[in-house]
Image (cartoon, grey):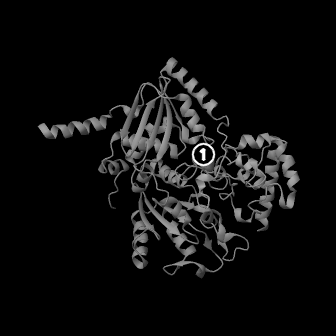
Amino acid sequence: MKYTPTVGEILQAKGVSRRGFLKYCATTASLLALPPSMIPRIAAAIENARRPSVIWLSFQECTGCTESLTRSASPTVEGLIFDAISLDYHHTLQAAAGDQAEAARHAAMEENDGAYLVLVDGSIPMGNPGFSTIAGISNVDMLLDTVKGAAAVVAIGSCAAFGGLPGANPNPTGAVGVQDLVKDKPVVNVPGCPPIPTVMTAVLAQFLTFGTIPDLDKHGRPLAYFGNTIHDRCYRRPFYEQGKFAESFDDEGAKAGWCLYKLGCKGPTTYNACATVKWNQGTSFPIESGHPCLGCSEPKFWDKGGFYQPLSTGHFGSGATVAGAAVAGVALGVAAATAGKRRQDKYTKEA
Amino acid sequence: MTALRDIEVQVQAMHGNVQPILNEVLHALDRLIDNDEATTIDLASLPFAPGELEALEASLASGEVSAQLDALGTSNIRETLYPGVWWIEHRNVYDEVVGRYLEITRMPEILSSQTADIRAGRARLGEQFE
């Protein structure tokens, strides 16, 4: 078996000083949503961690997830995490093609049997194997073959996690997510359309650092990032509780930065970290830019009614009802959000 | 055509997120004084409204000490107007902020010369003279 260097050795070879390493560990702790008091433990674990092999499979997808990760001008400190993994197979990023690429995948699987990570973006079509193939291999066959020797599987993006856009009603390809097919390996879902790059990096950092996968919620999402709703952590929430809402995208409420609930914000039923981690190197997130949350990290978000319909309107109420519920404050607001969630679930079951 | 910068956007800066952090700093200072216990607050994990981070920074202002670290990009380490409260900002080589912390301590650990670096430096110096 070939020698795999420790991360400490990799960083040392790059001339990274101990201070630089401490900075790296501080950023990693932040990535993992761990308290800064954990930095010494992270430092010790990372120094001795071995470089893991990663196989990235792309199925029915738009490459937005890879774009999110690679076009995010990944900070060098985070980038080091990628230097510290061995990305042995990725359709879009690798130079090899055809048989050579498939040979690289098989070599990585053999050399790292039982220890490699499989990352998947895109859904898997079950309607007809010919809907999506790579090197003549159907997506489902490639997935099941590749995960056989994997330590864990990470479903990147809402398509790989839940079926996503290809799985939207009427789901012409019979698209499913990874967790629908892989039952005998740990599966971590990192949904989003696309997911926040930091969250993708964090899952890799946790595996690299501690050799484990993060604690997950009922949808298989890392609790550290999907433990709160967007609404829970939204800086505009005080306006929700005061009953101050934007009624249209150009009214005084919108200009004053009031709550976007009545413009269809799905923040109350959407679990994700956009409100704290933010996008574009922490610049902002959609609500901060004046647009409601679309709920893209929730299962079947395409089929949950209109993006600009308030959660408690549509088939289950009127605009006036929403206004009443929301203006009445937190208790009624939560009730409205719960009703909205029930409505979403109903839509999902119907889809 | 109107440029983005020409569109008037009204930002209400204070949503009440600054005061709790200042209270946390106050309690951390008590722990530092009473038990010599250091505290780090990761500002990246907190929800800030536009303008609130700047308001927090302005509240703490600058004190007597500031230092710049050049490792994997620049880091600015500055003691605030309140001794023992340090504002630390890590940037990458593209000058993007990758971490922002408040450390309530006598001196941030990252400013101390690290044993591994001292050993490596001693070896380099030795090569010149031995």
Screen quadrant of the N terminus of chain A: bottom left
Q: Nearer the viewer, residue B42 or A156?
A: B42
The residue lying furthest to the front in this view is B1
Q: Residue, x 65% and y 64% (percent of image)? A: A162
Question: Considering the image in quadrants, where does the C terminus of chain A appear?
Answer: bottom right
Amino acid at the residue labelled 1: Thr
Q: What is the x, y in percent for residue A150?
A: 49, 62
Circle 1 marks a residue in which chain?
A
Residue A350 shown left or right of residue A69 in the figure: right
Quadrant housing residue A100:
bottom left
Q: Is residue A254 above or below residue B25?
A: below
Q: Position of residue A324 (x, y in %)?
A: 87, 47
The answer to whether residue A300 is visible is no
Relative vertical location of residue B39 with respect to residue A167 in this rendering, above or below:
above
Considering depth in this image, is A176 or A234 the residue closer to the camera? A234
Residue A298 visible in the displayed image:
yes
Provide residue A69's location: percent of width, then percent of height: 50, 59
Q: Residue at coordinates 41% horizontally, 46% vertically from top-left?
A: A46
Q: Which SS class for mark 1? A: helix
Q: Residue furthest left?
A: B130
> B113 left or right of A125?
left
- Count the marks: how many? 1
Going by the image, does A113 lie left or right of A263? left
Name the residue that disc number 1 marks.
A276
In the displayed structure image, the side of residue A22 where residue A67 appears, left or right: right
Residue A297 position within the rendered picture, expressed as x and y whole percent measured from the top left? 65, 57
